[in-house]
Image (cartoon, grey):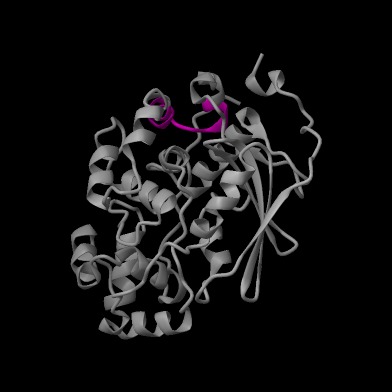
Amino acid sequence: MTIRERMPVLPPPADPPIETEYRPGTPIDAARAIQYQQRGAHDPSHVHAGGVIWRATRTPLGIATLAVRVERGRIRGAAWGPGAPWALDQLPALCGALDDPTGFEGHRHPLIADAHHRYPGLRIGRTDLVFDALVSAIFEQKVTGLQAFGAWRAILTWCGERAPGPTPRPMFAPPADWHAVPSWTWHRAGLEPPQSRTIVAVAARRASIERAMTPALAGDARDEILTSLRGVGVWTSAETRIRAFGDPDAVSVGDYHLAHQVGFALTGHRVDDDGMRELLAPWAGHRQRVIRLIGLAGPREPRRGARLSPEDHRDR
């Protein structure tokens, strides 16, 4: 019997939500900050419908569904579930309120200056849920986005917990116990054994990881902790720090496309990881901010050759 078969199909009745309203002191692009947390177009923990962003999360107080509507000058939030108070308290950080662009020198390159002018409200949001950020990054190790997002969708749908509240479609928060996911379920989802083994291994150290990753830690200290975990390298660490802590300086070294994208945007030709580090060095402290601006406004290198075809070794 699988985990999904043991769980109720229907969600619990929706209690009235608790609500809040957040008015940022300066204009911020909250919707874009939140949308960065979505893992693919069909992420069962993240839905955008009718002008509302819905998120299903597992907070320190329990599962929560958060609904966010971004309006001119204010951000309205409603939440359901035992984790609802935590989710609403964390809402400003999710929207990017804790990201401080002070000291960012966009003028160092004309493309970055133009992008910064066009997107002045760009902020890097954070979830403050380090373990979930780590697991989602492990899903994306050394595979295409199509494979990673498909596996994420399958595992959450089959093994996650149904989100409370009147969600626009069935939504699921990550599993409470990743150890309980059977090996054949990982296989059916299309996640490779190295990734599934790493997730199970870090799940055994979840409590210690969450205790160690305090808000006071600097990026280098967080990186040292994360990369000390077997199966977690610099790319996974950077992706985790970006998602969980909104690290404005994290760079996902080793990414299949990133160095090429940065190089083409800033110089007109591809560079490798070392070349990317050199190009981003003038913006130390804000390198992730530069990468976001390039992603929004940078030129795209023309595609050459066929797309990478994902390999599928599952028995049908």
Q: Is residue 27 left or right of residue 41?
A: left
Magenta highlight range: 186-199
Q: Position of residue 190 (x, y in %)?
A: 52, 33
Identify the residue at horizontal 66%, vertical 45% (top origin): 65
Q: Quadrant of residue 49?
A: bottom right
Identify the residue at horizontal 54%, vertical 49% (top origin): 39
Which quadrant holds the N terminus? top right
Residue 56 colored in magenta in the image: no
Q: Position of residue 60 (x, y in %)?
A: 52, 36
Q: Position of residue 269 (x, y in %)?
A: 28, 73
Looking at the picture, does residue 160 appear above or below residue 171?
Answer: above
Q: Quadrant of residue 247?
A: bottom left
Seen from the viewer's position, the closer of residues 143 and 53 is: 53
Identify the residue at horizontal 61%, vertical 53% (top origin): 41
Q: Main secondary structure of the magenta part?
A: helix
Q: Is residue 12 left or right of residue 310?
A: right
Seen from the viewer's position, the closer of residues 311 and 225 is: 225
Is residue 38 visible in the rendered structure shown here?
A: no
Q: Is residue 224 left or right of residue 198?
A: left
Looking at the picture, does residue 205 appear above or below residue 42?
Answer: above
Q: Is residue 144 left or right of residue 214?
A: right
Is residue 247 visible in the rendered structure shown here?
A: yes
